[in-house]
Image: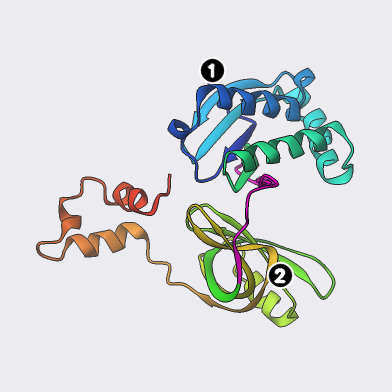
Amino acid sequence: MAEPRWSFMFRMLKRNPDRVPMDRLGEYLRLFAELLGTENQPIFKGIKKASTGLKAFVPEERLQHVQVRLKLVHTEATSRPARIAADLEAMLGADGIKEAQLLDASDNVIHLFHGVPAANEEVIRVWQEGTVDGVVTGLVGADDTMHLHLRGLDGHDVKVLVRDESLARGILAHFRNGCVRVTVRGHWVRGEDGWHPETNKCTAKSFDVLEDTPLSKVFQDFAAVPDSGWRAAESPDDFWRELRGIH
């Protein structure tokens, strides 16, 4: 019989497992279990090196109960699941982790955590125009202000505002279909891995569709160049990811 697939994963972005002290990892596991509900019998299913992904399995008959708990995070700020989610965000902030995701078994992001900086931690932000590359994963809102969700090429999730309906329709036409480059204007914040648009503090002004040539084909072209260092790389894909800090 096949091993049961994990049901949920708590994924801390831009933080490899070998950079998380073991006792601290245990604290994250404890809060993750409490978020799912210990009465729902979550079982540890390992760590995925996708940044740091803590995997949990929940028996099928308890999944509905977990889903009810997770809805409370969004609908009842005083509920225990919402308080646990806030505790996780405080831990992430204390550890300098900007974002984490809660994914279901289909790799869908069902909740996005933002690390809350400590009160004495200075947040560096500037007002500027810049571009964000990524895959369109959602567009939420029915009024004049919509919220665009992008999954960056580095795994970083970005939320920006869209105030132009025709622009929104154009972007949505590329939902989960290739990469787009969105020009945004607003507040950008500085993290340990560079500058990012502050969540829902930047407005999309325009977008372009990026060429979708597979990276493997690009690396083949690089390796075809005489005396290219790429030709000597055993795994160009992994080498590129290591250079970009993507795990």
Residue 108 is a magenta residue: yes
- The spot of residue 11 in percent (x, y) is 58, 39
Vertical relation: 198 (above or below) 67: below
- Is residue 70 shown left or right of residue 202? right
Vertical relation: 52 (above or below) 177: above
Task: Identify which amino acid the numbered label 2 is placed on.
Answer: Leu
Marker disc for residue 161: 2
Q: Quadrant of residue 69?
A: top right
- Is residue 151 shown left or right of residue 35? left
Label 2 vs label 1, nearer the camera: 2
Label 1 element class: loop
- The spot of residue 48 in percent (x, y) is 49, 33
| Spatial CA span between label 2 and label 1 | 47 Å
Placement of the N terminus among the 4 image quadrants: top right
Marker disc for residue 163: none
Marker disc for residue 1: 1
Does the image show residue 41? Answer: yes
Placement of the C terminus among the 4 image quadrants: top left
Q: Nearer the viewer, residue 217 or 47?
A: 47
Q: Which residues are magenta?
A: 106-126
User: Badge 1: how crowded within 10 Å, few (<14), some, or many (20+)?
Assistant: few
